[in-house]
Image: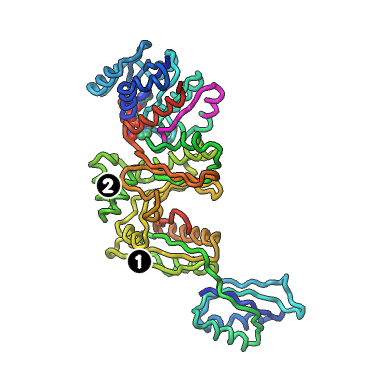
Amino acid sequence: MIKIAIFGFGAVGQGVAEVLLTKRDSLRRLIGDFKVVAVTDSRGGIVDENGVDLAKALEIKRKNKRLPEGITTLDVIESLDFDVCIEVTVTNIEHGEPGLTHIRECLKRGINVVTSNKGPLVVAYSKLADLADRNDAKLMFEATVGGAMPIIKLVKNDLAGNEIYAIKGILNGTCNYILSRMEKEKLSYDQILAEAKELGIAEADPTYDVEGIDAAAKLVIIANSLMGMNVKFDDVERVGITKITPEAFEVAMDKGYTIRLIAEVDRAEGVLRVSPRLIPIQHPLAISGTLNAALIKTDLAGDVVVVGKGAGSKETASAIVSDLVELYRC
Amino acid sequence: MLITIVVELKDQPGQLLKALEPISRFGGNIVSVYHQRDKITPLKRIPVEITIQIDEKRVNDLIEAIRKNGVIVRSYNEVRLTATTSLLLIGHIIHTDLGDTINRIDSTGFAEVVDMHISMPQLNQPSTAMVTISATNEEKLKRAIEILKNTCREKDITVIEPLELQ
Ligand SMILES: NC(=O)c1ccc[n+]([C@@H]2O[C@H](COP(=O)([O-])OP(=O)(O)OC[C@H]3O[C@@H](n4cnc5c(N)ncnc54)[C@H](OP(=O)(O)O)[C@@H]3O)[C@@H](O)[C@H]2O)c1
């Protein structure tokens, strides 16, 4: 029986709970019997060694906006017996907390970790990877990059044995939505940003996305975990999309190009940057809407391209569940 | 266009001036002058490689004029620009001395701005330019792009680079 604890019960935490509920039978066939023994949010949680009633937990959270108080995530880690934690709390890329402490404390105890939280990995990837190794635990993080778009396990497993020369990708759906709408509608950045906010695609404060911070964080994770590099967030050369004009698209189009925000890491060239780039309109990275995409350049397989949904509660849950299956496949 | 001229000079004062003087007269810009002291000829002349930017139509007259000054012109060749790429600039491109921006590339001697397409929406609004740069090879093209990026950073112009250099 696999005992799971879910830390963080927002969009992603709830999405995971729903998938574990609705796909219980098919998942059991893949990984054997499992139960969720704890669910926590920022102010409390529910613990039940016999298995938390997830439908009820979802109902309580949705009705009261919070889980019952009186329990902290650290209490759960210190006192409860479980095999794997699903760490889906808020991201902080400066100090990584609270996720960094959650992940560290779990790995120390030999508990496997599956996370969608970029913060801890951006701040301390190599330390966490070491800690996992030393304690015979696994750290899985497919959901931190590209949402449902497979890339971490794709490179680690399916492209195993290849040398990865470079990865160039669209890693932020909000920016891609804004740019592809500017391309089609010939409207200003501000007009399209307002539209994106109304649709819930951009946050009220869009800085994190439009200045390329989110994409840079994902690029750091890619560089460190897939290309054996040891880089920090500040090493990323970063230019956002706020200065791009509708005329820029017109001039680019005349020459057969469009503009997209591209995160690029290239070992030999020493490139680590997020910046708007001219993309030939026929190029596989010239995608539209909130999609993410990545072009992986390898020695044996040549170029490999993946495209998929970069965010969303169900989509991110897909990546988390795939990590869970990878850990426990019968 | 960009050409290199190799002349042979006697090792005496004032020789170089004889070779350089006609260049400005014919509207050329000197990009670099390189004394190949390790290749001194049996007659003790020093080969000097001069790279200049000049109107294609005036090259023959220039060479003629240098020879008239009593300088031996050993060879002259167009510098072939084999690597080309286009970049997009967004910002106050005109007000920040466009001539200077272009000149920083053209004066390298290994790259030049070969095409430029500017779109200006309104006065005081940022304009957009598609700039095409050619260089002697891909390595030099990358250096030219770095120079352009640094120049544009100073001038608060956004540079959008191509995904790959073709
Ligand atoms: N949403 C996506 O599409 C997506 C995609 C990829 C990756 N991610 C990443 O996945 C993570 C979760 O995203 P989300 O969209 O679910 O965010 P969210 O809706 O804001 O949820 C964050 C959750 O973390 C909880 N939390 C904060 N501090 C905690 C603590 N000390 N202990 C336990 N829980 C704590 C919050 O509690 P309260 O409910 O009490 O506030 C909330 O439930 C983030 O790191 C995000 O960057 C999200």
CB contact under 8 Å: marks 2 and 1: no
- Residue type at mark 2: give it: Leu
Q: Which residues are magenta?
A: A129-144
Q: Kindly identify which chain the residue marked by label 1 belongs to.
A: B
Q: Kindly identify which chain the residue marked by label 2 belongs to.
A: A
- Residue type at mark 1: give it: Ile
* Mark 2–mark 1 distance (CA, rounded to whole Å): 26 Å
Q: Ligand 1 is located in which of the four quadrants?
A: top left
| Residue A324 screen position, x and y as percent | 42, 25
Secondary structure at numbered mark 1:
strand
Secondary structure at numbered mark 2:
helix
What residue is drawn where x is 47% and y is 61%?
A: B148
In this rendering, position of residue B73 left or right of residue A38: right
Query: Is B16 placed above or below A100 here?
Result: below
Where residue A193 is drawn, which disc sits there?
2
A134 magenta-colored: yes
Nearest the viewer among A104 and A170 is A170
Where residue B85 is drawn, which disc sits there?
none
Mark 1: few/some/many CA within 10 Å (<14, 14-19, 20+): some
Query: Is A7 placed above or below A167 here?
Result: above
B130 magenta-colored: no
Quadrant of image for the N terminus of chain A:
top left
Where residue B118 is drawn, which disc sits there?
1
Question: Which picture quadrant has residue B137?
Answer: bottom right
